[in-house]
Image (cartoon, rainbow, N blue to C red):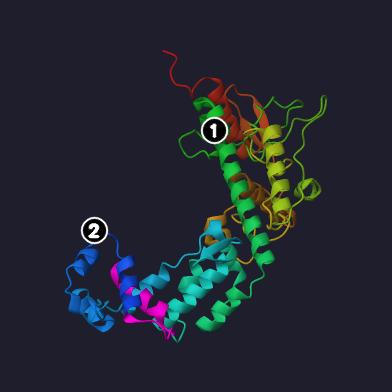
Amino acid sequence: GRTLRTINLIELHFIGKANATDTDRIATLKLSLKTGSDAHTWFKGLDNTTRSTWAGLKAAFDLRWPERVIAAKTTEEKTSTLMVAELKSKDVGKRVTINGVEEWSHIAWADRVEHLTGAIPDSKGLLINQVRKKLPRTMHNLLGSHSSWMAFCQAVWDLPIKCIQESNAAEQACIKVTKELEDLKQNIALQQTPSKALAGTFCNISIGNSLPAPCLLNTQSTPAPSMPHPKPALSANNPFYTPPAAANSTYVERPWAECWADVEQLALPIHPNTPEGCNLYTAQLTDWIKKHGSAKPNKTCPYPLCPRSLPVTSNNCWSCGLSGHMTNSCPNQHSKAPENETQWRSIAATIKCNIGRNTEIPTVNFIADNGAITYTMQDKYKAQIIVKWISQGKVDGSSA
């Protein structure tokens, strides 16, 4: 192949030169051959008659090195080449060198796609959506639907480079925030002992039939004692945990409307989906974790919301924070919100749902193990049983 290119270059060099002689061409070819190569050995072995004219020399050359016929690619092979034509995320918004010329990466990619589609051909544009889905998310979001390859390539060529760079920077910032959040979660998990993790799990599960049900008393026939029996405190990990009341005050279950007012008043600001907004969101997460550690959000402790998401006061998906679908059918599986954010949205939605129903949870009388009567809600009673078990060492196993 290299030898064939050499004689072709000599032909090109002497095109248009009327004064060039066969002797000039033959001498140029001889000087172009590497000493000791097959072509050089072949040239030395030619007789003088063959080497005396350029036509005779070229005929002998073509006989020794005939031009190879390259097998044409099939349509399937051309389609496969198109499908693997990739624009890498790291190259978006940057210049690349193609055949010694610098060009924006998306323009060079569109040039190649136009060439490949012309060779298939795909006149109906059936493969456009498949190729578009393989683009980095930055480019995919900036391009709409197109019915022809020329319209699709033209849309890529016309994209403003500033718009591409800003969109790519925002995407990379979100990826960085997600990674930092996962790192923070792992660090917190490493700091927790097995018993703490198990205790937190018990406080968040519901009690089945494995525990004996409490004896319910008729509130109308049983007089209420003047001083309620002290109730064990809920863990801070419980989503319905309420901070302790001030000294010398009696705790009263707050109405749903007041809880909803707290949700609106304590709501943290939602930042835009920009590099600056993502940095502010990261700072929010860092401050929240420093202040609350491994605790879970509750009615008076809101959790920061992802950029571009909607407030908890709107009807939206708890999983991704967007509207238009339910949580159990969320299509944004690749961009789910953190677990704590999902829990906070669930708490806020529960409060909002109960505002207009006039369904304040009534206080129910229970008989404790020692026969004393206590006043609490059934859910809190179950949680108190778990706390009691943990405090008695049931979680850590036998002391023997």
Residue 110 drawn in magenta: no
Magenta segment main secondary structure: helix
* Magenta stretch encompasses residue 3: yes
In the rendered structure, which amino acid carries the disc numbered 1?
A: Ala
Which residue does the numbered mark 1 point to in the structure image? Answer: 189
Res. 251 image quadrant: top right
Instruction: Give above or below for 336 relative to 182.
Output: below
Specify the farthest residue to the top.
400
In percent of width and height, residue 215 lies at: 57, 34
Mark 2 or 1: the one toward you? 2
Seen from the viewer's position, the closer of residues 124 and 164 is: 164
Q: Is residue 195 among what the camera can see? A: yes
**Numbered disc total:** 2
| Left or right: 28 in relation to 118 | left
The amino acid type found where label 2 is placed reads Gly
Residue visible at 62% across and 47% down in the picture = 177
Graded by Cα atoms within 10 Å as few (under 14), some (14 to 19) or many (20 or more), the crowding at tag 1 reads few
Image height of 289 relative to 44, above or below: above
Frontmost residue, 111 versus 41: 41
Compared with 94, 391 (above or below) is above
Residue at image mark 2 = 36
Q: Residue at x 65, y 61 (%)?
A: 165
How much space separates mark 2 and mark 1, taking CA atoms?
A: 69 Å
Tell me the quadrant of the picture where the C terminus can be found. Answer: top left
Q: Give the quadrant of the N terminus.
A: bottom left
**Residue 294 rendering spot, x and y as whole percentages:** 62, 34
Q: Earlier in the sequence, mark 2 or mark 1?
A: 2
Q: Nearer the viewer, residue 400 or 198?
A: 198
Dot 2 alpha-carbon crowd within 10 angstroms: few under 14, some 14 to 19, many 20 or more: few
Residues shaded magenta: 1-22
* Residue occupying image coordinates x 73% and y 51%: 276
